[in-house]
Image (cartoon, helix red, strand yellow):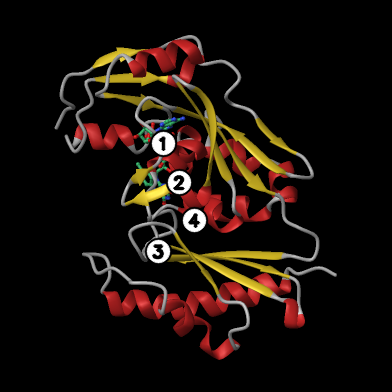
């Protein structure tokens, strides 16, 4: 199939891009196109206009400092994955990105685009949610920051307004003494995961804080606090907060079992990453 007809704009500045979106309620932003173009081709989306942001200057930056990692809207997954600064500052970003799709898709797809697309089967939204990161967006009334816990409102639905452009994402740095881990089960490496899990462990002993985020389990990326739960009960404790979905890829029971296995695995690995 071919996409339904649409107008196409390729603005040269952020101001022009925001104005183009504001003037066309049926318009959509085009970034890497790795999610949007297939949707157009299958006619699951039929925007009246595409506002291509690939010509906007200054949005392809990746910076890391002691606070965290800031990823511009045109930074490709592959560039973020290749960054030693990102890996050092927040290794969970790199660990999860290694599971995102295949090399050709990572060469074009953007990390910020993945966050806005808000697919509960995608890796990066759950990483942003687990770490308590944020998205910086610009719209007709200026710039605002959306905290990760206010970003995901439903299946494939974020709280970014139709006339806003996400300009960057911020992932907090790994704190001293904390550990992170990521793992997922997919039919083939690079496919969307049947279930994935990311863990963040901070502190130790009675002060240990354990949180795990899940992808491909619920309608939205979901983070569960498992602090104080005995090791043998981690998976079942997580399932009290999750409602594993059934679809053509996996039954709900199979997903629940993967939650048990992956929860134990990522918490164990994240603890090993804890440094004194
Ligand atoms: C075969 C295949 C396998 C894949 N496997 C995975 C996988 O395993 N894991 C995974 O996470 N992803 C996977 N992807 C998706 C890939 O990661 C995409 O790159 C990503 O989801 C979207 O990024 P994009 O830049 O391509 O966005 P686009 O496709 O251009 O846009 C996606 C959506 O986000 C909006 N958008 C994008 N950028 C902005 C912005 N800056 N401001 C406002 N709105 C914006 C668009 O309007 C659109 O609605 C796969 C894709 C394919 C084709």
Residue designated by label 1:
160
Dot 4 or dot 3: first in sequence order is 4
State whether residue 241 appears in this view: yes
Q: Which mark is residue 151?
A: 2
Q: Residues within 10 Å of mark 1 (few under 14, many from 20)?
A: many
**Could you tell me how far apart the alpha carbons at marks 1 and 3 are, in whole angstroms?**
29 Å
SS class of the residue under badge 4? helix
Dot 2 or dot 3: first in sequence order is 2
**Could you tell me how far apart the alpha carbons at marks 4 and 1 are, in whole angstroms?**
17 Å
Pointer 1 with pointer 3, Cβ within 8 A: no
SS class of the residue under badge 2? loop
SS class of the residue under badge 1? loop
Pointer 4 with pointer 3, Cβ within 8 A: no
State whether residue 98 appears in this view: no
Residue designated by label 3:
186
Q: Which mark is residue 126?
A: 4
- Residue 98: x percent and y percent? 55, 52
């Amino acid at each position: 199939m071919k996409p339904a007809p649409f107008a196409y704009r390729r603005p040269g500045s952020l101001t022009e891009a925001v104005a183009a979106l504001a003037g066309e309620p049926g318009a959509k932003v085009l970034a890497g196109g790795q999610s949007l173009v297939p949707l157009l081709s299958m006619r699951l989306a039929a925007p009246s206009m595409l506002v291509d942001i690939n010509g906007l200057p200054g949005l392809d930056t990746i910076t890391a400092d002691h606070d965290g990692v800031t990823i511009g809207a045109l930074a490709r997954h592959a560039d973020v994955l290749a960054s030693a600064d990102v890996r050092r500052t927040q290794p969970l970003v790199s660990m999860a990105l290694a599971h995102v799709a295949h090399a050709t898709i990572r060469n074009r797809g953007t990390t910020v685009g993945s966050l806005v697309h808000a697919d509960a089967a995608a890796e990066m939204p759950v990483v942003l949610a687990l770490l308590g990161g944020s998205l910086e967006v610009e719209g007709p009334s200026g710039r605002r920051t959306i905290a990760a816990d206010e970003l995901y409102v439903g299946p494939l639905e974020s709280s970014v307004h139709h006339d806003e452009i996400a300009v960057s994402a911020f992932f907090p740095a790994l704190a001293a003494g904390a550990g992170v881990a990521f793992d997922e089960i997919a039919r083939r490496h690079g496919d969307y995961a049947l279930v994935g899990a990311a863990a963040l462990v901070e502190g130790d002993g009675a002060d240990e804080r354990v949180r795990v985020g899940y992808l491909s389990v619920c309608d939205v990326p979901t983070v569960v606090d498992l602090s104080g739960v005995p090791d043998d009960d981690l998976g079942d404790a997580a399932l009290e907060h999750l409602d594993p979905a059934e679809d053509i890829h996996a039954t709900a029971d199979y997903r629940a079992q993967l939650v048990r296995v992956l929860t134990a695995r990522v918490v164990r690995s994240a603890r090993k990453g804890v440094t004194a």
